[in-house]
Amino acid sequence: MNYSKDIEKCIEYIEENIKENLTAGQIAAVAGYSPYHFCRVFSLCREMSVMEYVRSRKLSLAAVDLFKGRSVTDIALDYGFETHGGFTKAFRKAYGYPPSQYAARMAGYLQDVPKFKIGGYIMNPVMVSKPAFKVAGYGIETNVAGGNYTKDIASFWIHYEGENLESKMYDILNPPRHGEVGLCVPSFDSGYATYLLGVIVDDFSRVTPDMLTAEVPEAEYAVFTTPPVDTSGGSEQEDFVQVIKSTWKYIFEEWFKDSGYVYDEGKLNFEFYDERCHSRVDTVMEIYIPVRVRAGK
C-alpha cells in the first residue's frame, strides 16, 4: 500500500501547526489512522519516529530564527520548549553547538546569501555507506556533454516547465518512500547527458516505456546538505538553484582539497529532494558524493 500521500498530508499539518504542542495522536487523526498504526507507518516511510520529525522541524526553524537575531529564550518558548536549558540541550545535540555559539558561527550568512558564498556556511558532510538501489522516472535531454554530468547541470529539474512528470511518476510507480533522486546518465546516441529525476523503487515492474531506469551501485558517500533558503513565498526558486550550484562548486573546488578523500569515479553522484525542498523558510536538499579514502591516509 502506498502511504506517501497520507504522510505528506500529515507533514503539511505539522508545518502549519509546528509551534503547537503536537502529539502523535493529533497527527495520526489527520490521516485517519490509529496512533499505533500511524507511528509504525511514519517510521517506515521516514526512517525516524513522528515525534523525532516534529522536534527536528522545530529545531530547524529555530535555527532560522537565530539567524534573524531573535533571543534564545523567545525562540525556545515559541517552539514549545519548557526551559531555555531544555532547548539548548536539544539544539546542541542536533547541531553540535549551543544556540548562541551556532548563531555566532553563522553570523553574516543571511546577508551573504545573494552572493552565494557557501564558505560562509558550516559545510561538514555526513559520511554514509549506502547499499545499491534502483531508480525509475523521467528524463530530460540536456545540452551538457562530458563524463561527470550532475555537477554541471545541478538543479536542472527546477527549471523544467513541461508536463508535471513528478506527480505522474508517483501515481504510476507507487514508491515505498517519498523523495526524488536526480542523477545524470550518458546519452550515447547524442553524446549529451540525460537528467533523470526518479524515485527509489524495489523493482522495475511498474516502469512504463516512456520512463528511464538506473541502478546505482553500493558506495561510500559524503552527504552535503545545502544552506537553507527561504522559498516560502514561491518566488525564490532561483536562489535555491544558485545555492545548489554553489554547493557543487564548493565540494569540488574547496572541500576535496583538504578532506582526505578523493572522488570515486566508478560510482554515481546524485541529488536527493524530499519534503524539505518544498516552499519552506529553510528549504534544503542533499548532494551525495561517492568517495574513497585518499591513498596514504
Image (cartoon, rainbow, N blue to C red):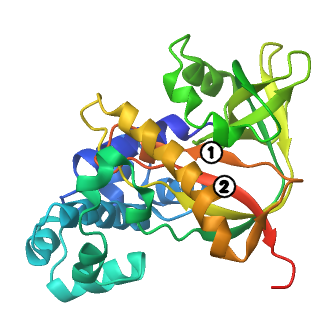
Q: Is residue 5 visible?
A: yes
Q: Earlier in the sequence, mark 1 or mark 2?
A: 1
Amino acid on which the number 2 mark rests in the picture: Tyr
Residue 239 lies, in percent from the top left, at 36, 38
Marking on residue 271: 1
* Residue 177 visible somewhere in the drawing: no
Q: Residue drawn 65% across and 37% down?
A: 152
Q: How many marks?
A: 2
The percent position of residue 19, horizontal first and vertical second, equals 18, 58
Residue at 60% of width from left, 66% of height from top? 255
93 relative position to 219: left or right = left
Q: Position of residue 289 (x, y in %)?
A: 70, 57
Crowd class of label 1 (few under 14; some 14 to 19; many from 20; radius 10 Å) = many
The quarter in which the N terminus is drawn is top right
In the drawing, what numbered circle is on residue 106? none
Residue 227 vs residue 36, the one in the foreground: 227
| Residue ID for mark 2 | 288
Which element carries disc 1, helix, strand or loop? strand
Disc 1 vs disc 2: Cβ atoms closer than 8 Å?
yes
Query: Cα distance, mark 1 to mark 2?
Result: 6 Å
In the drawing, does residue 240 fall left or right of residue 233? right
Q: Residue at x 16, y 60 (%)?
A: 68
**For numbered disc 2, what is the local secondary structure?**
strand
Q: Quadrant of the C terminus?
A: bottom right
Q: Amino acid at mark 1?
A: Glu
